Structures are given as structure tokens and as C-alpha cells.
Image: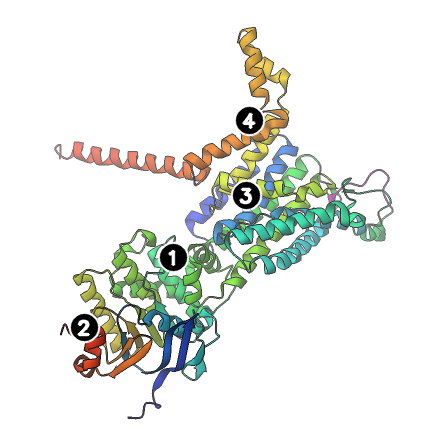
Amino acid sequence: MHPQNNVVLHVADVHKRFGGLHALADIDLQVEEGKTHAIIGPNGAGKSTLLNVIIGRLPPTSGAVIFDGTILTGKKPHEINQLGVARVFQTPEIFSDLSVLQNVMTPAFARRDGAFKINMFRQVDNEHEIREEAEAMLEDVGLISRREVHAGALSRGDKRRLELAMCLIQKPRLLLLDEPTAGMSRHDTNTTIELLKKIKARGMTKIIIEHDMHVVFSLADKISVLAGGRIIAEGLPEEVRGDPRVQEAYLGGAH
Amino acid sequence: MTSFMSRKDFILFAGFTIVVLLLPILAAPFGAAYPDLLQRFMIYGIFAVGFNILFGLTGYLSFGHAAFFGVGSYAAMWSFKLLSINALPALIFAVIIAGLFALAIGYVSLRRSGIYFSILTLAFAQMSYNLAYSVLTPITNGETGLRMTLQDPRALDRLFFEASPGAPVPSIFGMSLSGWNGFYFTALFMIATFFLAMRINNSPFGMMLKGIKSNQNRMNYTGFNTRPYTLTAFVISGMLAGLAGALLVVTDPLAGAERMRWTASGEVVLMTILGGVGTLVGPVIGAMMIKYFENIFSSFNANVLNNFYSFLPDGVREVMVTISSKFVGEGWHLSLGLIFVLIVMFLPGGVMEGVRRIAASFNRRANGNKAEARVATAPAE
């Protein structure tokens, strides 16, 4: 094993305290290029805190997050995104007042034009390339027939799919998914798994936080188990599944 | 043409232009067809369209836009006094100064959002008002207001010709801007402003602004640095407010501090909401409505009311006149408030929402008729 060779994200010795609460302790996580890395753990284990530290929403108390040689700690969300990190939220963050198509075109502009550009005298109608790209993306996630609908009118499952499309159109190097199938029907969950498998084939690195073991074991190349703010186990899915500490902490002996 | 402007936009723009240019005829049945009122329609229309670029697109509600309007007025007046009675340099100067002013105020205010942003802009505007009213009297001439005098240096004019006798009035390359000339002059700027607003609205930049209004958090995580976007929108709307303020001085050469008061800032908010926030035409309609009602209601007095109710018996008439008189003349704001409440309650999207609803019901009826026609003809075939 030469983990240093193709590690794209390194969470190095991160601690996070909220007052007296030690939300994250001694977190050391290495995510390899092209792999899907799942983070699982019981409620309150610190999964979302970890994701927020990675994306720059919360500053760590100590330690650093290094993405492809760049220290993310202290950078603003838009800077982190421009480096190639995109995030799907637990509750979909979309532009409810814009059409589905505009929702997907907007991130495409961010990728093409950068964090700020005064594009005042061009017209959206003439941006054929971006429009075609967005339509192809909607085709992929199965929302093409709803492209002119206001995004706020979509069902919850469709909103999640839309948010995923908004992240994917940026072709990020690292995609963070916070419970991408929470609240979805079995059918929608399976569609989403298929979709995530498809992007995995394109070589995108992913970190996925998930409760649903079916999703985790269908997708993950590597699993880290978080409990009480610490990583208590890490390894291939089958290793983690068999680990007695994990069963005790998380699966509660149900397996 | 298709690559320059879509067919729909072209029709909208052409329609808008025609309506504006025909206003002297179209406004006649309403008793509004005189240049003084129509040019105020245009000036406040520009103000509201500019305001809507900030409020309508980004959702940032500024309560201090009258400051930029006032700064534009003073800047234009100083251009008249120092440079030339030509309106063009005055307008350019006013837009630049208002833009710089907006840059400074926007830079600070946009560090906060929501109600805090509104309060910051309000505070800055009240500070500007107080500066203009008392502290900066040498520049603004305090409560008397700034006007042109025969003693003004007017350096550019003096280069070319001797001071003309009589009080100086603004003009454009020697052409007077009083009366209908003034209206058409302001109308040109109204049309240009509308064109600009339309281009911004349909541009990627406009889409980003709408994204900021819809979900600023997502914009940040999508890789946009939102602050320069909001600041650009703020400065553009500040410059248009300055343009409007300057045009007001062009048509009525007196710059006073009361134009910067918070009521003036509130008025442009009312105009935009009344017409329809975030729509292109709405703010213009709102501005016209408020200026029209201001003119009509405030001109009513007891005599007019007595005539209006002359068909009623004496006792009833006096009661009606007493009640109504509270809503007209000095009290016309009561009527305005009433209209505003009704619109916000029943048409939260403003007049433009009403227009949309009517259009939708017509469409439905037309489609319904078509469907019926199809059913009716089906057996005959």
C-alpha cells in the first residue's frame, strides 16, 4: 500500500470542539482518487460536522484539510468549489425560483466563468453550449421532461436528483454526498444508486455519508466508521461488516 | 436579430418604446398629458427600474436609494454651475458621482443581508440627508436648495460665448429642455434604461443575481463569489438613481435635500412593489401610478369635492366631503396607503401579477373554447 501516491483528500489530525463538546477528535482520513469513500456511524457521531469541516463551512479547532496539495482550511466555500469540490446537502439546496434547466445551467457558468464575471451583455438564450450540456445532464438524471418547471415545484426525490445534477455538471474532482438517498422511496434509492455507479465509472472521487447500509455496501470502496467523534474502524466493506467493534457501536448486533 | 434579441424580447421592447413615445396621446384621457407630469413618470420610472435591478433580481431591499437620487441631483446642479448649462455633461457627471457613492455605501452595507442590510442603507441615506441639509451647506445650500445663478462660473460655456442675459436654464446643445422637449429627452433615457434592464435580466449575470435571491448558500457552494455580484447590481442601480436625480434637475433646476429623505427612499420601494417586483415593466407602471395619484389626489380640494358630490342632498354631501377630504390634498398619502394595502393583500405580485392572471384566464378560456370546438366538430367529420 502506498496511500500517499493517489490520495486526493487528506483530513489531517482534525479536532473540532463546540464549547465542552468534542465533536471530532483525531480524525485522520485519506481519500484515494477515483474511489468512493463512505463514512458511516450512529446519529451524533460527527459525520455532518466532518463534512462541514471539509467543505469549509466550519473551521476545525486544530488540524487541516488538504485537497490535492492545497490546504482548504480557512478558504471560503466558493474558493473550495472552484478547486473542484462540490457538495450535495442533506436537505437539497437548489434555486427554487428558477427553472430546472436554469438550476443546472448556473453551476455550468461557475465552472466556465469562474467565481465572478460580469456577463452583462451576453444573453442566456445564446449560450447554446451550456444549455446543451445542461440538457444532457438532465437527461442523465431523468429530469429532462421537467426542464421548464420551477425547481421549487419538484418532489423531494427530484430535488435531490436535481442537486446531484447541479454538482455533476461541474465535473468536480471530489463530490461530497450527505445522505443522498434519505427520505427516498426504495425505487428512487435504486435509481440514485445506479446514477452514482455511473459517475463512479467516470472516475470521480466521492465521499458519501449514509445511513442506508444497502446504499453503502452497493457503492463504497472503503468505509470509515465514526462513533463519538472518532474513527473506530476503517477498511473494505467486507472487513468493516465483520468488525465486532463496528457491530457493537453501530449495527447494535443486529447482523 | 435572433442572436441579438429574441423575438419575444424584441416585441416587448418595441411595445414599450411605442407606448412611451405615444404617452402624450395615451395619457390625455386621464388628464395627465402635460409635460411636467409625464417627464416625472419617466424620471421615477428610471429610478424604479434601476432600483428593481437590485431589489427585484438579488432580493436585497435597499431603504436608502434616495441618497443616490439626491447625489445625482446635486452633482448635476454643480455641473450646470461650474461647467455648462448643457445637460449631457451634467448627466454623465451625476451618474459617475452617484456610482462612486453607491460603491462606497454598497461595499459596507452588503457585508450584511436581510433586514440588517436594509437598516444599513437606511442609516447611510439618513446620514446623507443630514449632511446635505445642514453639515455640507456650502455644497448643498442647506434647506434653501441649490439653484443656478447668473454669477455661476460655467467655465465651458464662457469659453465659447458670452454669458447670455436672463436666468440660465439647462439645455442640450442650445436646444431648450422645457415643455415637450423635456419629456422626450427624459423618455429617451427611460427607453435606454429599460433596454439595459432587459439585457441584464436575460444575461448570465442576471441569472446569477436571481440565483443569489433564490439561494445564496447554494451560489457560494456552486463556486460563485456572490459579493461582487451584489455590489455590481448595487452600483448599477445607484447610477440609475443618480441619472434619475440628474434628469429631475434638468427639468426642474433646483436640488434640495428633501429628495434624500427616507420617505423618498420608501417611495421607490412602494413603486416597485406596486408595479411588480422582479418584472421589467412593473416598476415603470408603479412609478407612473404613484406619480399620477400624487398629482390627482393632492390637487383635489374642498371645492372639487363639493362639485363631485353635488348630486347628494346638503347634509349627506357635507359628511362625504369631510370624510373624503382627509384622503385628498395634503392627505393623499392616505389614499396611496389604501391602494398599497389592497394591492399587497390581493395581488402580492403587484399590478403585473394582475396582468398575468388576466392573461392566463383568457388563455384558459381560449383553450377551453378550442377544446369545445374540437368536441363539437368531431362527430361531423
Badge 4 density bin: few <14, some 14–19, many ≥20, Cα 10 Å: few
Furthest residue in direction bottom, as rendered: A1
Residue type beneath disc 2: Gly
Residue type beneath disc 3: Val
Q: Nearer the viewer, mark 2 or mark 1?
A: 2
Location of the C terminus of chain A by quadrant is: bottom left
Badge 2 density bin: few <14, some 14–19, many ≥20, Cα 10 Å: few
To which residue does mark 1 refer? A95
Residue B101 appears at what percent x and percent y?
66, 56
Residue type beneath disc 1: Phe
Decide if residue B356 is on the left or right side of residue A222: right
To which residue does mark 4 refer? B30
Q: Which residues are magenta?
A: B163-171
Host chain of mark 4: B
User: Looking at the image, which residue is at 17% across and 62% down?
Assistant: A187
Structural distance between the alpha carbons of marks 3 and 4? 25 Å
User: Looking at the image, which residue is at 62% across and 37% down?
Assistant: B40
| Location of residue B214 with respect to B29 vertically, above or below | below
Mark 2 or 1, nearer chain start: 1
To which residue does mark 3 refer? B269
* SS class, disc 3: helix
To which residue does mark 2 refer? A252
Structural distance between the alpha carbons of marks 2 and 4? 79 Å
